[in-house]
Amino acid sequence: PSWEILERESIRRLERVFTFKNFKQALAFTNRVGELAEEAGHHPALLTEWGKVTVIWWTHAIKGLHKNDFVMAAKTDEAARTDEAAK
Amino acid sequence: PSWEILERESIRRLERVFTFKNFKQALAFTNRVGELAEEAGHHPALLTEWGKVTVIWWTHAIKGLHKNDFVMAAKTDEAARTDEAAK
């Protein structure tokens, strides 16, 4: 599973699901992506559930996708690669 | 705003939005609810966005709502009451 461009509420968004073996590992990844977001000053929607996190990037100001969203998606992937728990 | 019972994907769920003044405070609340979930062994879906967290409770095993979901909703409210940032 990789990133998909999905339209939700008329806004195109980049979306990817990362899976984990429990809730705790999923929440730890949510926090890791949250740190990336704070560093970049650009914030996603993060849906944390038992064993998975759905990461959704888009740019509020333009109600759609901007280059920066793709940069943040790549950073999210890098965070997942260095997170042994992420699949 | 309080809890609403919403049907999503044919499953009735308890859902409430809590608002915050930024992403960091929202993520802190997500973690607080995550702790409650781990303590109870019952886990919600937590949608963390800039300035808000949507908390969704339901019981996977019965694909619907059980008394325990209402107990967890009350615990979530209690966490919000003791979180000065939550509205």
Image (cartoon, coloured by chain):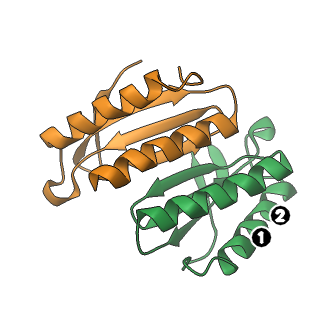
Chain colours: A green, B orange
Judge left or right: residue B53 versus residue B51: left
Residue A74: mark in rendering:
1
Residue drawn at (39%, 62%) of the image: A50
Q: Position of residue A1 (x, y in %)?
A: 55, 78
Q: Position of residue B73 (x, y in %)?
A: 30, 33
Residue A71: mark in rendering:
2
Quick one: A46 or B8, which is closer to the camera? Answer: A46
Indicate the chain on which mark 2 is placed: A
- Residue type at mark 1 is Ala
Residue drawn at (67%, 60%) of the image: A32
Judge left or right: residue A80 versus residue B76: right
Image position of B7 with respect to B4: above or below: below
Residue drawn at (77%, 70%) of the image: A74
Gap between marks 1 and 2 measured at Cα:
5 Å
Q: Dot 2: what SS?
A: helix
Indicate the chain on which mark 1 is placed: A
Mark 1 touches mark 2? (CB < 8 Å):
yes
- Residue type at mark 2 is Val
Image position of A24 with respect to A62: above or below: below
Q: Dot 1: what SS?
A: helix
Quadrant for the N terminus of chain B in the image: top left
Residue B68: mark in rendering:
none
